[in-house]
């Protein structure tokens, strides 16, 4: 189309949702090893160096580097789920974000349901000066990763909700049995009264049973299980965020001699291997 001066004006097409999803898929697929192995390995080294006082202040526990690393490691899960994000699923995820903030705020104020604890390092912007704004980015992917892994491990048995839901809840709590001891060891947060399980009180896990149950039931309701299975089959990188989890927190736990959580991390790695999710292309 010509403008008033006779020049040809071009219109720039806005990418469709499907085009954006394909670009994100390609970005993740082309960088799988970097995202799922290099980032968590470097992250573990930097966290340990921060905890041991080996990094200067601008880098030590830098909250924006932490958030950047977490966001990058979440990309495979985000790309994998994006085509399945219907209005119903979006509303469910927003509801879970609200629940995550609410239950954490109650926990900070009352000590229930997770036990009395306090954050030890800066985790970025805070909501009401009490809880990290990025909290859903930390919690919800754990639940979704556990859900996806259990769908693959259970196979046809995943059709049975009476089996599927409690198995996923157990998998979510198991992931916190890996995460919390490592987070306490490096000083992300601490529990006022400590705890027999590597400084973590058992009340914390009662709280995780509650939150995992709420989150799993919501995800089970708002996502189409058949769609998730089809996407898992077509998208080999969809559980790479869980690979990152195994490497990052397994490494940290092993460094501090937290052998039970370290072995549990290896167990999740074994489950990923069993369902053929360690299949990075050669570099």
Image (spheres, rainbow, N blue to C red):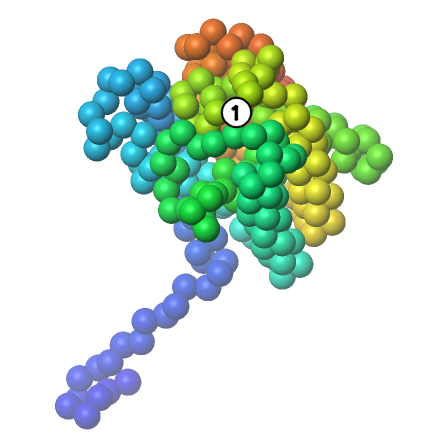
Q: Who is closer to the viewer here, 180 or 282?
A: 180
Q: Residue 166's spot in the image, x, y percent?
A: 77, 31
Q: Residue 187's spot in the image, x, y percent?
A: 41, 23
One can see residue 144 in this view: yes
Q: Tell me which residue sits at (17%, 89%) in the image.
A: 6
Q: Residue 101's spot in the image, x, y percent?
A: 55, 47
Q: Tell me which residue sits at (48%, 25%) in the image.
A: 190
Write down the quadrant of residue 112 in the picture: top right
Q: Quadrant of the C terminus?
A: top left
Q: Is residue 80 above or below residue 94?
A: above
Local secondary structure at mark 1: strand
The image shows a total of numbered marks equal to 1
Q: Who is closer to the viewer here, 127 or 25?
A: 127
Q: Tell me which residue sits at (32%, 30%) in the image.
A: 61
Write down the quadrant of residue 158 in the picture: top right
Horizontal side of 65 relative to 20 (left or right) equals: left
Q: Tell me which residue sits at (44%, 10%) in the image.
A: 256
Q: Who is closer to the viewer here, 239 or 110?
A: 110
Q: Residue 201's spot in the image, x, y percent?
A: 61, 21
Q: Quadrant of the N terminus?
A: bottom left
Q: Is residue 77 above or below residue 276?
A: below
The residue indicated by pointer 1 is: 191
Residue pushed farthest left?
A: 5
């Amino acid at each position: 189309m010509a403008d008033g001066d006779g020049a040809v004006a071009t219109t720039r097409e806005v990418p469709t949702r499907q085009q954006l999803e394909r670009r994100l898929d390609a970005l993740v697929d082309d960088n799988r090893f970097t995202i799922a192995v290099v980032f968590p390995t470097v992250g573990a080294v930097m966290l340990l160096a921060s905890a041991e006082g080996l990094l200067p202040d601008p880098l030590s526990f830098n909250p924006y580097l932490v958030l950047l690393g977490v966001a990058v490691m979440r990309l495979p899960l985000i790309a994998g789920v994006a085509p399945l994000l219907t209005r119903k699923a979006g509303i469910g995820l927003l509801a879970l974000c609200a629940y995550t903030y609410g239950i954490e705020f109650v926990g900070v104020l009352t000590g229930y349901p997770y036990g009395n604890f306090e954050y030890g390092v800066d985790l970025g912007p805070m909501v009401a000066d009490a809880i990290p704004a990025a909290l859903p980015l930390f919690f919800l992917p754990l639940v979704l990763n556990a859900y996806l892994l259990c769908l693959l491990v259970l196979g046809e048995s995943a059709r049975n909700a009476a089996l599927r839901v409690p198995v996923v809840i157990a998998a979510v709590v198991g992931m916190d049995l890996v995460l919390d001891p490592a987070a306490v060891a490096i000083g992300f947060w601490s529990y006022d009264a400590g705890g027999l399980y590597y400084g973590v009180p058992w009340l914390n896990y009662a709280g995780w049973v509650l939150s995992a149950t709420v989150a799993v039931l919501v995800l089970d309701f708002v996502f189409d299980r058949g769609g998730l299975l089809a996407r898992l089959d077509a998208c080999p990188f969809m559980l790479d965020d869980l690979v990152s989890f195994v490497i990052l927190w397994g490494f940290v736990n092993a460094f501090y001699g937290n052998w039970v959580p370290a072995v549990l991390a290896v167990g999740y790695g074994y489950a990923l291997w069993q369902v053929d999710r360690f299949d990075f292309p050669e570099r």
